[in-house]
């Protein structure tokens, strides 16, 4: 499990993702992206509110991906967790993998901030139990050849500038919330990451030969 300190352009992750899938190299990445909008395989063009030229003039890149879902956004202050897991090797079904991935976030958020999060069968992600219309965590995963990629994005203290340019997963951007917007201590980021690593390891135990050093060189 590898945590990156600097912001990673989304295109660089896509390049690494293809290498990991090609060689079925397992690893879990914790990082933040520079401002980016991504469209999943089920995207609705109406949910992209501005064109590429407008977005790029504001420093927001846009990419289309093979993950599930509609449009979402990534930006500094949002923790992204990308899990690259060989489901055949781990003897995991897609359903069990998704359940455990979300459970890892739920348990970690509760232990860190006392947040109670729930799922919504009609809209992927995690929502506040106290206010189910408010979404704090997005999920979008790809399972090509039973090797996972993409993952979850958890809002800590992002400013939602990129989200204002889309209807995230078909919803209004104002439905999105963050640890900071809830008045909680977003500086507990490292505590949350430590718990995520522990909870993910309990059911995945990824074993990657890629080291943090080799990946840092890739992202230079």
Image (cartoon, rainbow, N blue to C red):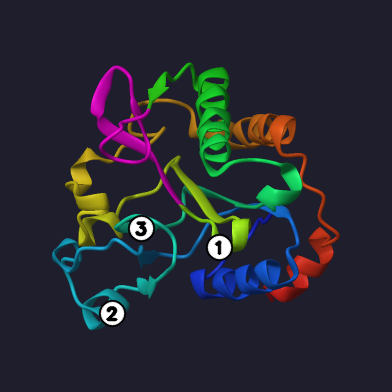
Asked if the residues shown at circle 1 and circle 3 are in contact, with their CB atoms under 8 angstroms apart, the answer is: no
Image mark for residue 73: 3
Q: Which residues are magenta?
A: 119-140
Asked if the residues shown at circle 1 and circle 2 are in contact, with their CB atoms under 8 angstroms apart, the answer is: no
Query: Is residue 117 among what the camera can see?
Result: yes
Q: Nearer the viewer, mark 1 or mark 2?
A: 1
111 is within the stretch colored magenta: no
Q: Nearer the viewer, mark 3 or mark 2?
A: 3
Left or right: residue 169 compared with residue 149: left
Image mark for residue 57: 2
Q: CA distance from mark 1 to mark 2?
A: 34 Å
Mark 1 element type:
helix
Mark 2 element type:
helix
137 is within the stretch colored magenta: yes
Left or right: residue 71 compared with residue 32: left
Q: CA distance from mark 1 to mark 3?
A: 23 Å
Left or right: residue 168 compared with residue 183: left
Q: Position of residue 114 (x, y in %)?
A: 48, 16
**In the rendered structure, which disc, 3 or 2, sits on the residue that comes first in sequence?**
2
Judge whether 220 appears above or below 208 on screen.
below
Q: Nearer the viewer, residue 77 or 3?
A: 3
Report crowding for label 3: few under 14, some 14 to 19, many 20 or more residues within 10 A (C-alpha). many
Quadrant in which the C terminus appears: bottom right
**In the rendered structure, which disc, 1 or 2, sits on the residue that comes first in sequence?**
2
Query: Is residue 2 among what the camera can see?
Result: no
Q: Position of residue 31 (x, y in %)?
A: 59, 54
Q: Position of residue 61 (x, y in %)?
A: 38, 74
Q: CA distance from mark 3 to mark 2?
A: 16 Å
Number of marks in picture: 3
Q: Nearer the viewer, residue 48 or 8?
A: 48
Residue topped by disc 1: 144
Q: Position of residue 13 (x, y in %)?
A: 58, 68
């Amino acid at each position: 499990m590898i945590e990156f300190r600097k912001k990673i352009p989304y295109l660089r992750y896509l390049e690494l993702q293809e290498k990991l899938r090609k060689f079925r190299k397992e690893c879990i990445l914790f990082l933040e992206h520079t401002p980016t909008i991504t469209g999943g395989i089920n995207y609705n063009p109406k949910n992209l509110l501005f064109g590429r030229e407008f977005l790029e003039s504001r420093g927001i890149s846009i990419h289309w991906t093979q993950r599930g879902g509609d449009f979402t956004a990534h930006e500094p202050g949002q923790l992204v967790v990308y899990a690259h897991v060989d489901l055949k090797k781990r003897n995991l079904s897609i359903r069990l993998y998704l359940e455990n991935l979300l459970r890892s976030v739920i348990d970690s958020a509760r232990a860190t901030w006392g947040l109670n999060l729930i799922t919504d069968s009609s809209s992927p992600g995690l929502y506040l139990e106290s206010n189910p219309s408010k979404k704090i965590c997005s999920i979008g995963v790809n399972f090509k050849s039973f090797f996972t990629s993409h993952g979850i994005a958890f809002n800590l203290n992002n400013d939602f500038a990129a989200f204002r340019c889309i209807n995230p997963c078909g919803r209004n951007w104002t439905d999105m919330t963050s640890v900071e917007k809830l008045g909680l201590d977003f500086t507990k980021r490292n505590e949350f990451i430590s718990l995520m690593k522990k909870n993910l390891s309990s059911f995945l135990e990824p074993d990657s030969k890629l080291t943090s050093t080799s990946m840092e060189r890739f992202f230079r």
